[in-house]
Image (tube, coloured by chain):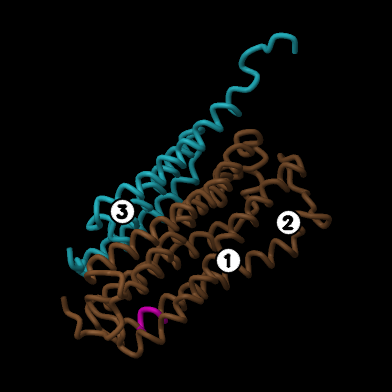
Amino acid sequence: MSVHIEPKRNYFLVFGALLILTALTTWVAYFDFGAWNNVVAMGIAVVKASLVVLIFMHVRHSTPLTKLVVVGALLWLVFMVVLTMNDYATRGLLGVLGK
Amino acid sequence: MPEHHQPGALAHHFETYDQQKEASNLGMWLFLVTEVMFFGGFFLAYIVYRSKFPLDFAYASHELDVTLGTTNTAVLIASSLTMAMAVRSAALAKRKAVVGFLILTMLFGGVFLGIKAHEYHTKWVHHHVPGPHFEWHGEGADPHHAEMFFNFYFGMTGLHAAHMVIGIGLLTWLCFPAWKGRFNEDYHNPVEVVGLYWHFVDIIWIFLFPLLYLIGFHMHGH
């Protein structure tokens, strides 16, 4: 495999993109889109995080095993959040017998 | 196998430098997985409470200084750039550049923590630190629910800041072997894995910033 040296230019491009996205997420927060504010804010954060993981953390060029570990971490995080909210968000939706 | 580079740089239980690199990177990633779950529990609790008290959290969030939060985000992104450049310089065996970028990364980290300390101080003065001295005079939010927001604010940014302090310690330690010219294409694993840690801490902040600072921004106008 030997080391992949990322061109300097790519690092500076990612840096620029991250700054622009930071400005964008702050600017967008001025407006009231209701529930969409969360979607936009988290969407931008996910794009920023992906840039850091793929370029700064070299996952783009890492071994399949490392990629699997990264995806696995996210998958289990999603399990934890979705299954927990599946409980909290639906409490009281159905009448419970005998309550 | 270029054994001549650094005596002792290749640990005896590895066949090649590539194998050693893969092992250390994978090991660091596995540690970061545990960190994802460590912070993940906090994020999950935040989601549960915010979905229960959305307006209270928004009003409480409005008390945070968005200008300082945005500045700190930019500072941390700059530190990630210099960290990436330090790893790159280490792989290219550019001794002085590695040390320079490590020091720059620590400086940006220090600026971040300084701004954070200033924000904490302001919150302390305004009685927004959860506990017996907590006071809430703002409209809109129930004081207990606003206090819950500040529990998350201090808990999550505090845990994040603790990681930054550890990161700065690791970067300080790296400066010595870097200065001695220990790192090259075959062996720069310590810089690489500390870089992974530093970038991970940056990613945590990328999520903390909108979740803590920006959720009440649109409510009172500007």
The nearer-to-camera label among 2 and 3 is 3
Chain A, which colour?
Answer: cyan
Query: What kind of residue is marked 1?
Result: Ala
The nearer-to-camera label among 2 and 1 is 1
Instruction: Work out how far the residue at label 2 is from the one at label 3, CA to CA, in angstroms.
Output: 42 Å
- Chain the render paints brown: B
User: What element does badge 1 sit on?
Assistant: helix
Q: Position of residue B139 (x, y in %)?
A: 73, 43
Q: From the image, tell me which residue sits under label 2.
A: B128
- Give me the chain letter of mark 1: B
The quarter holding residue B93 reads: bottom left
Q: Nearer the viewer, residue A97 or B118?
A: A97
Q: From the image, tell me which residue sits under label 1.
A: B162
Asked if marks 2 and 1 touch (Cβ < 8 Å), the reply is no
Q: Position of residue A28 (x, y in %)?
A: 44, 46
In the rendered structure, the answer to whether residue B44 lies left or right of residue A50 reads right
Q: Nearer the viewer, residue B79 or B16?
A: B16
A39 drawn magenta: no
User: What element does badge 3 sit on?
Assistant: helix
Residue B202's place in the image compared with B102, above or below, is above
Magenta region = B99-103
Residue at 73% in and 48% down: B147
Residue at 74% in and 9% down: A98
The answer to whether dots 2 and 1 both sit on one chain is yes
The answer to whether dots 1 and 3 both sit on one chain is no
Query: What kind of residue is marked 2?
Result: His
